[in-house]
Image (spheres, rainbow, N blue to C red):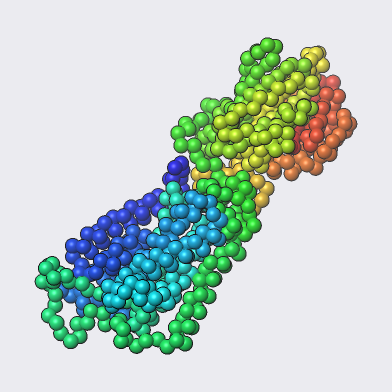
């Protein structure tokens, strides 16, 4: 039941559904206490008001509610009102069947196209066997079966038009941007159902008017049972006070050609309404494929967008009781290990956190240990290390130790070197740090999503012999990330239309809330040039938190390279670059060491790719 009220539309739907309940209560009371109608019609209006809310209330008051005692017979005579009555008892049955079927098929996990067929069949059955046949029997007598037969064609035509309006409304809205509408536990589902019924009503209305005029469907009627106050209020009988002027067995019957043509058009409309949305949305998906995903505004999902893709691009559903980490919270804090039999043991917990990147701007981040970037892991070459990763995310995850040469089961690549860590589960990554250098760790399951939401951190391995370390008096770890925040929701930024970033962070903060750097970068655009003016030496270490965007930039570097000159990782990096003796580029990782004044300065920049 999480995330019921997270978008403005949710509040509108809540208000609408509340009004619908209030309207229904009033219509129910008014029908039974004050309106002289047969029971089937009463229940018809009650159900339609439940689904159509204030709009149905309006229709009831304008077309059916007796204005003054004794006037119902005359009041409901106009054909347009009879058409309303006919549509109401069609819609009441059909939409009850459709909505029941929608709830059941959603929980069964059937694909949307099958949902629609089951909904049509159930709606038709409900309409025919309950509302039409019962109503006809009420009106014209005869056996129930005779009435089922007599109602079949009118119900068929009306249902086709109803579904022609309701099906595309459901398909396009449920499978469109906010797929919480697929979930009966969400308000939005009921909002879409309500709108679908309203659209279905409008589309089915003209055919109902025609069928009432032709006497094959019943409109409104008056019922004043003896002994009730309705009977006492009955108008004096006069010739033109027919109960239902436009109905009855002797009204002008349609010719079979007319009936055939209307039926044909209703079928065409039905087919269009059921099939046409498949041009725009993927009707093969089921509610459980898409979960409660909300796509970024502007993102276009197509007929072949898979559920997995949608889930990876979807908004983070805000944590319900997670406190906001304000600007005082820091990312990249050094993680203190505990010693266990000579092994340095680190604990990483992946979860959702509400993280402030600017005053007044928060993101719903995926974070290690509640911080963005994740805590810094620092060990020494030769250390035996174990990192226990626990998953509190709503999806599976793994952690990859980027750039390290490791036994396969410790490499953290989901589905390749290990099964992903289930929600609530843990995995122990144990290895000996054989290399030295600047690395980073990051999620390697749903990679595009989880890294772009903050699941990464720095992993620094100091050389076994401290004398091998490059001389520096300041070390700065810089981790950059892109974010997409719209309508108060956080989406993983991706290099594609609709998912482009609108915030950029350095070490978890957007400018000007970025942390003041102790590195001379503050005062000039390049570390190397500032270092020149700032003896004796400055070493800057930068790790780029990989979003697909930064990967696109870094991927211009060679996939594998030895300790030889290598191209710059970024067009903006104008410093002379060459790989230094301690660079240990790993597969897919691009490391460049920039030296401008080798005597005093080693400025190392690391951009990373998966
Ligand atoms: Cu990587």
Q: Can you name the residue that lies furthest to the top here? A: 341
Look at the picture and state if 448 lies above or below 128: above
* 574 and 345: which is toward the camera: 345
Give the percent coordinates (x, y) of residue 117: 51, 63
Give the percent coordinates (x, y) of residue 498: 61, 52
**In which quadrant is the C terminus drawn?**
top right
Lateral position of residue 165 relative to residue 75, left or right: right
Lateral position of residue 354 relative to residue 401, left or right: left
- Residue pictured at 57% horizontal, 34% vertical: 423
Look at the picture and state if 63 lies above or below 177: below
Give the percent coordinates (x, y) of residue 318: 50, 39
- Residue pictured at 44% horizontal, 63% vertical: 122
Residue 352 picture quarter: top right
- Residue pictured at 44% horizontal, 48% vertical: 186
* 263 and 8: which is toward the camera: 263
Look at the picture and state if 224 lies above or below 424: below
């Amino acid at each position: 039941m999480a995330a019921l009220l997270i978008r403005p539309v949710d509040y509108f739907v809540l208000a609408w559904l509340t009004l619908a309940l209030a309207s229904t209560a009033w219509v129910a009371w008014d029908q039974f206490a004050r309106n002289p109608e047969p029971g089937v019609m009463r229940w018809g209006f009650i159900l339609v008001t439940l689904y159509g809310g204030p709009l149905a209330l309006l229709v009831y008051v304008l077309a059916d509610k007796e204005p003054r005692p004794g006037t119902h017979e005359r009041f409901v005579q106009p054909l347009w009102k009879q058409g309303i009555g006919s549509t109401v008892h069609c819609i009441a049955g059909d939409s009850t069947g459709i909505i029941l079927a929608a709830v059941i098929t959603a929980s069964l996990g059937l694909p949307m196209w099958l949902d629609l067929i089951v909904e049509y069949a159930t709606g038709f059955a409900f309409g025919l066997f309950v509302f039409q046949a019962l109503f006809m029997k009420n009106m014209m007598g005869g056996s129930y079966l005779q009435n089922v037969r007599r109602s079949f064609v009118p119900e068929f035509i009306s249902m086709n038009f109803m579904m022609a309006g309701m099906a595309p409304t459901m398909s396009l809205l449920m499978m469109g941007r906010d797929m919480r509408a697929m979930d009966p536990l969400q308000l939005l589902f009921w909002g879409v159902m309500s709108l679908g019924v309203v659209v279905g009503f409008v589309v089915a209305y003209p055919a109902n008017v025609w069928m009432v005029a032709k006497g094959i469907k019943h409109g409104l009627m008056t019922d004043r049972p003896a002994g009730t106050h309705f009977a006492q209020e009955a108008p004096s009988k006069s010739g033109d006070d027919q109960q239902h002027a436009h109905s009855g067995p002797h009204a002008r019957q349609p010719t079979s050609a007319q009936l055939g043509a209307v039926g044909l058009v209703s079928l065409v409309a039905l087919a269009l309404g059921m099939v046409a949305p498949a041009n725009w949305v993927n009707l093969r998906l089921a509610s459980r494929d898409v979960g409660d995903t909300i796509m970024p505004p502007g993102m276009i999902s197509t007929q072949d967008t898979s559920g997995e893709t949608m889930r990876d691009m979807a908004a983070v559903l805000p944590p319900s009781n997670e406190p906001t980490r304000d600007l005082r919270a820091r990312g990249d804090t050094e993680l203190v290990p505990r010693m266990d039999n000579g092994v340095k043991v680190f604990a990483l917990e992946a979860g959702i956190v509400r993280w402030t990147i600017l005053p007044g701007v928060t993101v719903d981040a995926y974070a290690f240990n509640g911080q963005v970037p994740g805590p810094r892991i620092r060990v020494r070459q030769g250390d035996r290390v174990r990192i226990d990763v626990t998953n509190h995310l709503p999806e599976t995850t793994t952690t990859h130790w980027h750039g390290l040469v490791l036994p396969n089961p410790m490499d953290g690549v989901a589905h390749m070197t290990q099964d992903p860590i289930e929600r609530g589960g843990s995995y122990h990554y144990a290895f000996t740090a054989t290399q030295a250098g600047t690395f980073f760790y990051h999620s390697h399951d749903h990679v595009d999503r989880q890294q772009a939401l903050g699941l990464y951190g720095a992993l620094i391995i100091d050389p076994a012999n401290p004398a091998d370390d490059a001389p520096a008096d300041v070390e700065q770890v810089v981790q950059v990330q892109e974010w997409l925040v719209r309508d108060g929701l956080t989406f993983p930024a991706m290099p594609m239309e609709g998912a482009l970033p609108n915030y950029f962070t350095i070490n978890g903060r957007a400018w000007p809330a970025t942390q003041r750097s102790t590195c001379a970068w503050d005062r000039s655009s390049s570390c190397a040039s500032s270092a020149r003016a700032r003896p004796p030496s400055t070493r800057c270490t930068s790790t780029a938190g990989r979003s697909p965007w930064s990967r696109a930039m870094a991927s211009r570097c060679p996939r594998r390279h030895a300790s030889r000159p290598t191209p710059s990782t970024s067009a903006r990096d104008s410093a002379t670059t060459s790989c230094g003796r301690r660079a240990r580029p790993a597969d897919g990782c691009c490391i460049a060491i920039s030296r401008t004044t080798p005597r005093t300065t080693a400025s190392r920049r690391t951009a990373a790719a998966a």
